[in-house]
Amino acid sequence: MIIVALTSSVVMAIVYLNILNKNREEKTKLEYYSYINQLHDIFLNSDEVKREYVLDEKIKVKTTVEEEWQVFLKKMLKRNSNFFTSVAIIDNNTGRIIGVYGNGRNKLQKANNIIFSPTHPAASLFKIVSSAELLQNQKISPDTKFSYRGRGTTLYKYQLKDKITKWSRKINFKKAFAFSNNVIFGKAAIKNSNAVELSEMAYEFGFNRDILTNLDLQLSKFRPATDQYNLAEVASGFNKKTLTTPIHAAFLSYVVASKNPVKTISIIENISKNNIIFVNPERKVISHVSKSLREDVYNLMEFTALSGTARSLTRRLRYNVKKNYSIGAKTGSITGGLPKGKREWLTFFVKPNGEDDLGISVSIMNIYKDKWYQKPTYFGKKVIKHYVKLKSEPKRLTSSGRN
């Protein structure tokens, strides 16, 4: 009887301790997210992301951004003459945002509010998603040829018809991606895809879902197509309803350049109170895009950086840089979004050849009002050169060694 009583007491004690631990964990989670909410408001109402924030005397927040990159980006954009330019950099090895900054002649809105808000049409960046969907299950291949009439930068209903005239031209899918041909993407989507399949692939690339581990921001918005012509508009990026952020634009390259499983990215390193560090939530698996499919899109982006609309990104780079690094890119441009103006996009990855290092993914967004001054590829080339410089000084580049 005594043994039974003792056993019951031990069981009750264990149950009680478990309840206490659960309550303590719930309290800690609530406390953690209350600090995250405070940080969220600070983020959106400031012009830059700092390495460290002090919420009060006891609570400190460290972000993943690195001083080396932040100082470089500030210096690069100090004399930026565009209405606004933003740069976001993700370490493909860790999923950490190691650099993010915006600047320009716009003084009406805080830079971070522009960078972290999904008010920017994705334009032809969405062709990365469409390509993955069309190449999936070998529906088409990079060498599949299509005919089209008119300019590739427009998208009229007559252009989507399979009518061959003396003005028709043929181009393969690889070149259509590299030169951002709206007509080819529209025709390919109508013949080989549908609204549901394209929506599923958009979800795999982070649309309509959280891509950040520990900071709740507005989601990039994707609306499924309502008819065949709308499907062509959505697949080609020729619309103003697919909205994204500069962070998500870099994330698109991150999905292509990283390894399986593709996880969410992060911008909070840790939160501490009285020198006690809160445990960050684990990064979640966000994409199940197959390795072979990502390699196909990877090759398309490499060709675009070499011979397509992003070729000025790699033009006149030193021979040893081209030889020792892989660079892939996608461009896009469209008028619309908030703040009002013309958007010009560039998303790209750069990684060392023959190494386990997965490199970085970068997005650059320009907003023009009256005219343009510096193109995204101008800034992109500077980022590549700085990354190569840091790689030659491994002690200064610490992000790839993090877990």
Image (cartoon, rainbow, N blue to C red):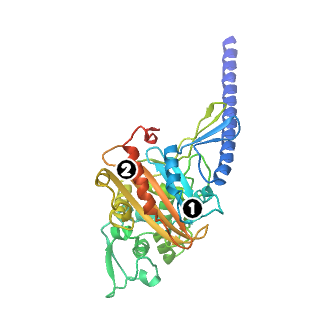
Vertical order, 277 against 154 (above or below): above
Q: What label sits on residue 104 in the rendered view?
A: 1
Residue 250 x, y percent position in the rendering: 48, 56
Q: Residues within 10 Å of mark 1 (few under 14, many from 20)?
A: some
Residue 140 in view here: no
- The quarter of the image holding the N terminus is top right
Helix, strand or loop at label 2? It is strand
Q: Which residue is mark 2?
A: 351
Above or below, 355 relative to 217: above
Marks counted in the figure total 2
Dot 2 crowding, Cα within 10 Å, few <14, some 14–19, many 20+: many
Q: Residue at x 34, y 53 (%)?
A: 326
Residue 86 visible in image: yes
x, y percentage for residue 262? 46, 49
Locate residue 208, reporting x and y percent: 57, 59
Name the element at disc 1: loop
Looking at the picture, which amino acid does disc 1 mark? Gly
Q: Please tell me which residue lies in front, 73 or 145.
A: 73
Percent of width and height locating residue 149: 38, 83
The quarter of the picture where residue 397 lies is: top left
User: Does residue 5 appear left or right of residue 149 in this picture?
Assistant: right
The residue at 41%/64% (across/down) is: 131
Q: Earlier in the sequence, mark 1 or mark 2?
A: 1
Q: Nearer the viewer, residue 387 or 21?
A: 387
The answer to which quarter of the image holds residue 382 is bottom left
Instruction: Work out how far the residue at label 1 is from the one at label 2, CA to CA, in angstroms.
Output: 29 Å
| Quadrant in the picture for residue 390 | top left
Which marked residue is nearer to the observer: mark 1 or mark 2? Answer: 1
Q: Tell me the amino acid under the disc marked 2.
A: Lys
**Side of 91 where 56 appears, left or right:** right
